[in-house]
Every structure is written in structure tokens, then in C-alpha cells.
Image (tube, helix red, strand yellow):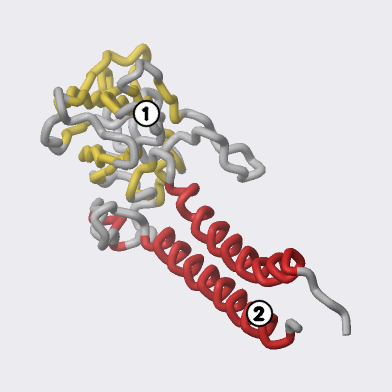
């Protein structure tokens, strides 16, 4: 009968648990990483409609807080009207600019000036701390009818003076860049639009964080798979104990 050393036996017992723990970590980390960006919800709106757009801004820094958020609105395909929802502890400013070239809409209107930026600035004691996020909402419209999507770059300022620009376009390959710009998909006015998107709300988020249902589903699925991995590790551990001399 072969003799197994205590060190080898410990390594054999630890291996199944390590595999289960790794599975849990990977499945949970994937959806969380995907959510750690500045996003706009809903991500689509009907052409010609007025949409309530909510920008979710997480503080990704471990040492600094978010003190200012700027969202750039399109000047080549402008909204003619933008209003904002007040955020307690933050001041808001809508910047209106005279366009370098008037824009003619399909409806026959001529736009010579339009909102081009929305700026939110935290008052003392109201910055978004590490591990937290804040939501900023505007009502914008009419949604341009001559495009299929609108990029809405965002700029996030931290208390240490650093600025993160969420303005990178997603390449044709579909691989998401490090700092993707929030994008609003524009669908035809007579197309079927998700009820939540058409209403311009974020009511699909039942949790306090406003996380999308897809991300929640992925997170729950990840937890289930990770738990299964841990369970398999425990079973293997028990079997190993039975057969170990």
C-alpha cells in the first residue's frame, strides 16, 4: 500500500475547493465588469419622440470621488429641447450653442441653435464616493429622424483632478473599447420599441442600483454556476477523504 504524505494529501483535498472558488469568481466578475461603465438607459428611442435618458455613472476609483459629469449632445443631429431632472446635492446646467451650420429636419424645421452639453457638478459633501454610483436624467427631443444611432460622450471628473473620457466608439469588430461612449439607438417611429424604452423610463430596474435585467440575470446565473462549482468541490473533498489511506 502506498503512503501519501500529509502535504500531498492536503494539496489533493484543496484542489477541488480551489476549482469551485475560481468558477464562482469568474462567473460573478464578468457581469460586474460589464456594468462598470457610464451607460445610458434606455439604449434606444423612436425617431421624432421625446425620450427620458438616464446616465448611470459609477465611481471606479478606489481613492477619489466623482465630483462632476459632463455629457456631450450631438450638434450635427441636434435635439431642439433638453430639460433635466434635479439631483439632490448637485447643480445642473444645460449649455445651448449656436450651430455653425443650421440643420434642416425631415419635418421641415430649421435648427440654428441647440443644447450641446449638460453639466452636473456636486456640491460639498455630495460627491459620488468609491463603490457608489449616481444617476442623471434628461428629457431630450425630438429624437433625430435622419440617423440610426447617436453617440453621447461623457466626461467624469474625480476629486483628485483626474478626468475619464467615455468617448470611444465601438469598432466594427464589436469588441468594446476601454472607455466606450454611451450610445442611443434610434429606431423608426412606427417600429416596435420596448415598452420601457418608449416610455423613456428606467423602471425595468427593480433594484436600487438601476442595474439592467440582463446584467442581473447574468449575475444570478454566475452565482448559480459558481455555487455548483463549489458544490462539486465539496463532493470531491468528501470522496477524497473516504479513499485516502
The residues tagged by marks 2 and 1 sit, at their Cα atoms, a distance apart of 41 Å
Estimate the x, y position of residue 9 in percent, counting from the top left. Answer: 73, 71
Say which of marks 2 and 1 sits in front: 2
- Image coordinates of residue 16 in percent, x first then y, are 65, 71
Q: Quadrant of residue 244?
A: bottom right
User: Which of the 4 image quadrants contains residue 27?
Assistant: bottom right
Residue 121 on image: x %, y %: 21, 23
Q: Quadrant of the N terminus?
A: bottom right
Q: Which residue is mark 2?
A: 236
The residue under the point 57% across, 63% down is 21
Kindly state the secondary structure of the residue where label 1 is placed. Answer: loop
Instruction: Depth check: give the residue in front, 201 or 7.
Output: 7
Q: Quadrant of residue 138?
A: top left
Residue drawn at the location 14% of the way across and 36% of the way down: 87
User: Front-most of 168 and 9?
Assistant: 9
Instruction: Name the residue nearer the viewer: 81 or 5.
Output: 5
Q: Which residue is mark 1?
A: 63
Amino acid at each position: 500500500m502506498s503512503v501519501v504524505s500529509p502535504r500531498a494529501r492536503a494539496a489533493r483535498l484543496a484542489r477541488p475547493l480551489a476549482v469551485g472558488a475560481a468558477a464562482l469568481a469568474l462567473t460573478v466578475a464578468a457581469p460586474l465588469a460589464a456594468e462598470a461603465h457610464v451607460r445610458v438607459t434606455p439604449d434606444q428611442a423612436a425617431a421624432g419622440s421625446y425620450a427620458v435618458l438616464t446616465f448611470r455613472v459609477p465611481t471606479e476609483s478606489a481613492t477619489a470621488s466623482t465630483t462632476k459629469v459632463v455629457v456631450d449632445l450631438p450638434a450635427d443631429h441636434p435635439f431642439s429641447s433638453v430639460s433635466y431632472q434635479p439631483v439632490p446635492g448637485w447643480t445642473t446646467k444645460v449649455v445651448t450653442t449656436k450651430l455653425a451650420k443650421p440643420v434642416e429636419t425631415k419635418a421641415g424645421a430649421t435648427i440654428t441653435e441647440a443644447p450641446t452639453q449638460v453639466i452636473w457638478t456636486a456640491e460639498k459633501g455630495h460627491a459620488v464616493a468609491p463603490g457608489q454610483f449616481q444617476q442623471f436624467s434628461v428629457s431630450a427631443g425630438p429624437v433625430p429622424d435622419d440617423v440610426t444611432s447617436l453617440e453621447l460622450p461623457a466626461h467624469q471628473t474625480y476629486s483628485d483632478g483626474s478626468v475619464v473620457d467615455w468617448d470611444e466608439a465601438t469598432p466594427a469588430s464589436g469588441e468594446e473599447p476601454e472607455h466606450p461612449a454611451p450610445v442611443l439607438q434610434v429606431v423608426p417611429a412606427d417600429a416596435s420599441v420596448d415598452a420601457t424604452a418608449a416610455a423613456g423610463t428606467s423602471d425595468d430596474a427593480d433594484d436600487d442600483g438601476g442595474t439592467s435585467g440582463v446584467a442581473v440575470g447574468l449575475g444570478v446565473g454566475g452565482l448559480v454556476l459558481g455555487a455548483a462549482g463549489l458544490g462539486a468541490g465539496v463532493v470531491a473533498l468528501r470522496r477524497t477523504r473516504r479513499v485516502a489511506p
